[in-house]
Image (spheres, rainbow, N blue to C red):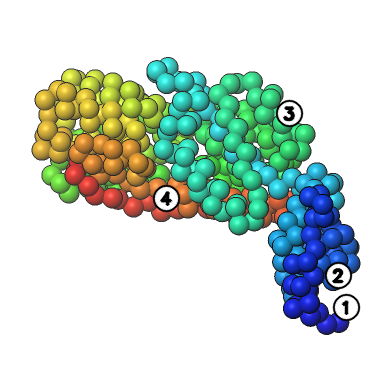
Amino acid sequence: MSKIDAGAITERMSSRGGRGGQHPTMDQVAEAAGVSRATVSRVINGAPTVDAKIREIVERAIAETGYVPNVAARSLVTRKSNSVALVISEPDRPHDSSFLNRVFTDPYFGRITAGATAALRPHDIHLVIIPTDSADHRHVLRYLRQGHVDGVLLISSHERDPLPRQVHDLGIPAVVSARPAAPLAASFVDVDQRLGARLAAEHLLARGCRTLATISGPLDIPSGLDRLEGFRAALAERGLSEVPSLEGDFTRRGGEECARRLLEAYPGIDGLFVASDLMAEGALRAVQDLGRRVPGDVAVVGFDDSSAALDCRPPLTTVRQPVEEMAAEMAELLMAHIAAPGRLPRSVTFQPTLVVRDSA
């Protein structure tokens, strides 16, 4: 087919399509575009050998005839489902909210979903969200093993979680949302956690705070430990070696309980670094309930720069990790692994920034 008359193609496409209310067929698309059925098939399946002009005409024919490819048949040809799983694996926590409630209300998970979806949508790849809070991940592994998705975006950082290793052993392309707690030959995306905590420490010191404390995240995950150690190291460099701390759990209630205990044990605290915005929201409530002004008596810095930071009263000074951009990078890495299964693992680390508001 040496020359194609675009006008004639448009005329054919406008006069043909699904006949008698029936769904358009691939043959009708080929007839409307003036190409062979095999050419239409190559375009649908993303074959790189199709001329760009012919591809454009076929795609116009598909759009104007309303043809919808048979996904199941296409999968048999391409061996691709055009779907990836976002698996959220979190341990049970002792406080009041259920696991599913946390997944759908914690701003962090929403930001991950939004960032990944934005990166995948232009490639016509669907995101399947699979939350799991049990040590028994057989249902997740069974779903992945059956080929329902082409790869996995895995949110898991708990050191006792077997799922990262189990997914790795399946051989399915996967990218992890943070540095794995246990050594694993897998791509991951993270933020410089220690630097973020240092930014918080330096800001509190610059405000004149001298009796500082921190509410850490869970210490059995790398981010929780790194934020604690980064904060302590920055203060130790300024001669402040004794830093009261309590281990939190990334929930509002956990932050409130820890802040209350810290302030009752150390009434002179004038600066508090809280390792997540949700915990900081709870901590602010405790500080104010105890009759302290924020930031006049106690300056508070959080971590994440999520929507919770703006819900706080006063609005929260916080360390921003660019979660949407990080999730998009995870999706891009995953698509690269799907396209080239033998690709070596790669890690990407984003830089945090301090967002100054009214709490410190």
In the rendered image, which quarter contains the C terminus?
Answer: top left
Q: Is residue 122 left or right of residue 340?
A: left
- Residue at figure coordinates x 29%, y 33% from the top left: 280
- Residue at figure coordinates x 12%, y 29% from the top left: 292
Q: Which mark is residue 322?
A: 4
Q: Which residue is mark 1?
A: 1
Mark 4 residue type: Pro
Mark closest to the chain's N terminus, 3 or 1: 1
Neighbours of disc 2 within 10 Å: few (<14), some (14-19), many (20+): some
Q: Are marks 1 and 2 in contact (CB under 8 Å)?
A: yes
| 350 over 60 or under it: above or below | above
Q: Which residue is mark 3?
A: 142
Mark closest to the chain's N terminus, 4 or 2: 2
Residue 238 picture location, percent across and down = 21, 45
Q: Is residue 207 left or right of residue 70?
A: left
Q: Which residue is mark 2?
A: 35
Mark 1 residue type: Met
Depth check, mark 3 against mark 1: the one in front is 1
Q: CA distance from mark 4 to mark 2?
A: 47 Å
Q: Is label 4 in a helix, a strand or a loop?
A: loop
Q: CA distance from mark 3 to mark 1?
A: 47 Å
Residue 185 picture location, percent across and down = 64, 43
Mark 2 residue type: Val
Q: CA distance from mark 3 to mark 2?
A: 42 Å
- Residue at figure coordinates x 72%, y 66% from the top left: 60
Q: Is label 1 in a helix, a strand or a loop?
A: loop
Which residue is more in the foreground, 219 or 282? Answer: 282
Q: CA distance from mark 1 to mark 4?
A: 49 Å
